[in-house]
Amino acid sequence: MSITETRAAEDSPVSTPPPATGSRRGRHLYPLAMRLHFYAGFFIAPFILIAALTGALYAIAPTIEGFVSRDLLAVESSGPARPLTDQVNAAVATRPDLTLVAVAPAPNDGDTTRVLFNDPSLGDSERLSVFVDPHTAQPVGESVVYGSGGALPLRAWLSELHRSLHLGETGRLYSELAASWLWVVALFGLVLWVHRVRKRRERRSGQWLLRPDLSQPRRRKMNWHGAIGVWILPVVLLLSATGMTWSTYAGENITTLREELSWTTPSVSATLPGATGPAVTAGGDHHSAGHVAPTPEDPAARIAQLDRVYEAARAGGITHGAEIAIPATAGTAFTVKELRLPGTYSIDAVAVDGDTGAVTDSLAFADWPLMAKLTSWGIAFHMGLLFGVPNQLLLLAIMLGLVAVIVLGYRMWWQRRPTRRAALPVPPRRGVLRRTSRWITVPLVLAALVVGWFAPLLGVSLLGFLIIDVALGLAARAPRL
């Protein structure tokens, strides 16, 4: 089977002309959508299936982490919290060999305070955290944490499994391929499903897009395939878009585009008024952490300023759990930035002069560009953190629905595979693309070129499909010996 010889969707033993419903352009778009949906689904679906299965685990990782690492994340003691200075000094005493870089005070009652150190033996975006009981100022344990979200080893392992299958940069190509094609397969599948629904008597009722027709047993798998696909479509498109921001090639193009359109995440300035030297900022989109940090000048003095800094930050609008970055050089302020925690919809940040407790700069989430806000919310949703456990359960359901759609799709192909000869649908003739109106062909070709350039893995694989199609067509015309 080739791209230009995709089998018709209807269970008909004879070749069927384009359906009579809809416009002529719609009749031409249907076989094109069928070819692309089938071929992309057939070859790319294994990558999407892996991404869905690992994504299901990644979706509920924050909840799993809360249970598995409860001894580090939660305490049973109560009473007023000890000064932040005491908590940090207790952590520093356990790891005097490492460089103190930040502290994340306990965001809620029953939580631990995280005191973060730079450890040269760790990898990129990794830091060592000493967890301290805020009520007793006693360390309860330590662990490596990953990224700005402070993921512990289990959640970080699940994240890397979803991201690259633990195969390094090469493994990231699988997830980029899946994210790049997911929205294409989904949208062309929607075209096919709308076409099928319009053929029913009740085609004017929108409910048929969401309800599978179970009156025909032979087509139940197809109807479930289409209906479930529509149910999960909005979230799938969002996951595909946000997933591409983490990718290697498409992600780089997205970053460049956002920079050119001034859609990047703004940063608070950590440079104190009157200080000389280059400006220092704190912030970013994905908040990579764990780079080699210089040792703060007079660290004891910096630690002694923490309570003043934190009090000023709270007065300056920091109301959620936050991380306080400790400056390493003179002329640099403490930066206090809210963390991406479950149920947190804004990320405010301030810079505080440690000597005076004055807020020298502030950046409210309300002042972010709209696209930066949407990106932040999308990333938090993708990570299962936007609205906590309901977010995670929704993602789990969507991933299981995506798995069901893929399995049903392969099941339909298996029942109609070319080795079967009874009651098989006959593929339409070759050359449908040549007979398609230029009003459809030209925009599709231009869109394919633009999207292929923007998402290179999608473009390369699409070119591969076309090469396979041409090769199969030439082989079919060659005389048999």
Image (cartoon, rainbow, N blue to C red):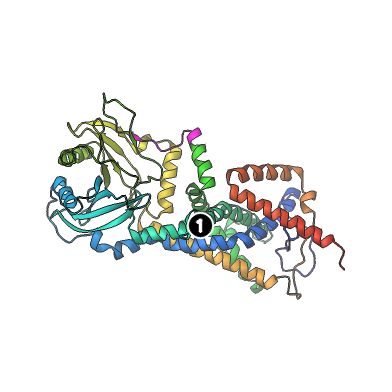
Inspect the image, locate mark 1, and give the three-letter code of the amino acid beneath it.
Gly
Residue 185 higher or lower than 345, as above or below: below
Judge from the rendering whether residue 450 lies leftward or rightward of residue 163; answer left or right.
right
Disc 1 secondary structure class: helix
Q: Residue at x 72, y 42 (%)?
A: 442
Query: Does 264 appear in magenta?
Result: yes
Q: Determine if residue 121 is in view.
A: yes
Q: How busy is the neighbourhood of tag 1: few (under 14 within 10 Å), some, or many (20 plus)?
A: some
Left or right: residue 125 compared with residue 250 = left
Q: Does residue 429 show up?
A: no
> Residue drawn at (54%, 63%), measured in percent from left and top?
49
Q: Quadrant of residue 57?
A: bottom left
Q: Quadrant of the C terminus?
A: bottom right
Image x and y of residue 110, in percent: 20, 57
In the depicted structure, whether residue 270 falls above or below residue 289: above
What x and y, as percent, mark residue 454? 58, 43
Comparing 116 with 409, the one in front is 116
In-image side of 238 versus 274 (left or right)? right
Q: Position of residue 50 (x, y in %)?
A: 52, 63
Looking at the picture, tell me which residue is in the foreground, 102 or 368: 102
Q: Which quadrant holds the N terminus?
A: bottom right
| Numbered marks: total | 1
The image shows residue 304 at horizontal and vertical percentages of 15, 40
- Residue found farthest to the top: 274
Q: Which residues are magenta?
A: 259-268
Q: Quick check: 296 left or right of 423?
A: left
Q: Is residue 187 magenta?
A: no
Residue position marked by numbered label 1 in the rendering: 171
Instruction: Work out whether 81 lies above or below 442.
Output: below
Q: Give the main secondary structure of the magenta stretch.
A: loop
Residue 307: quarter of image: top left
